[in-house]
Image (cartoon, grey):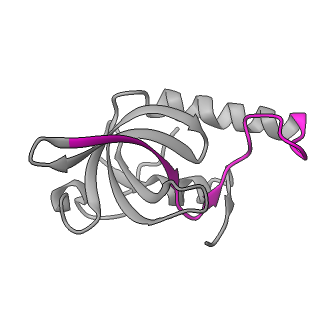
């Protein structure tokens, strides 16, 4: 399912460097939005919604212009993420600026069951599950 490649050496070893934090997944809202509990250090954490940077996932709701096919692809991606990275999964995130909807944009690093680390944003793009965007 998820890749077995090492995209960055020891992402977790550099936690608490500027804008890099340990986090726990609270829930997936859709394929590019996740609610996280972010560990800020010194026993301080914050729970908020974050958007995966550089990507745009299919919508999971029927807004104007969203087709049933797009909604189905969006729900399938959300389910896949929930299965592969369920609530409680520990990840490393790198925060950047706030996006147009007020959520911080993040790069998310995950370690799979074999100990391989990868950038989830890159993986979603490389698998063709999302489209690339620039802000």
**Closer to the camera in the image, 91 or 36:** 36
What residue is at 88 percent from the left and 33 percent from the top? Answer: 68
What residue is at 51 percent from the left and 57 percent from the top? Answer: 121
**Closer to the camera in the image, 64 or 106:** 64
What residue is at 76 percent from the left and 37 percent from the top? Answer: 73
Give the magenta part as a residue range: 45-68
Left or right of 96? Residue 90 is left
Using the rendered view, name the quadrant where residue 115 is placed: top left
Residue 76 part of the magenta-drawn span: no
Using the rendered view, name the quadrant where residue 107 is placed: bottom left
Q: Please identify the residue farthest to the bottom as the structure is shown.
A: 134
Quarter of the figure that contains the C terminus:
bottom right
Using the rendered view, name the quadrant where residue 99 is placed: bottom right
Residue 60 part of the magenta-drawn span: yes
Q: Is residue 45 above or below residue 87?
A: below
Could you tell me residue 66's position as x and y percent?
Answer: 86, 43
Left or right of 112? Residue 11 is left
Q: Please identify the residue farthest to the front as the structure is shown.
A: 102
């Amino acid at each position: 399912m998820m890749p077995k490649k090492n995209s960055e050496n020891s992402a977790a070893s550099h936690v608490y460097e500027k804008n890099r934090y340990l986090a726990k997944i609270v829930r997936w809202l859709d394929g590019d939005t996740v609610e996280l509990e972010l560990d800020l250090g010194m026993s301080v954490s914050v729970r908020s919604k974050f958007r995966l940077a550089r990507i745009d996932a299919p919508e999971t709701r029927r807004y104007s212009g969203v087709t049933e096919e797009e909604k189905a692809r969006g729900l399938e991606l959300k389910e896949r993420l929930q299965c592969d990275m369920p609530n409680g999964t520990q990840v490393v995130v790198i925060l950047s600026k706030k996006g147009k909807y007020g959520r911080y944009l993040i790069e998310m690093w995950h370690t799979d069951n074999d100990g391989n680390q990868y950038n989830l944003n890159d993986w979603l793009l490389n698998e063709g599950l999302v489209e690339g965007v620039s802000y």
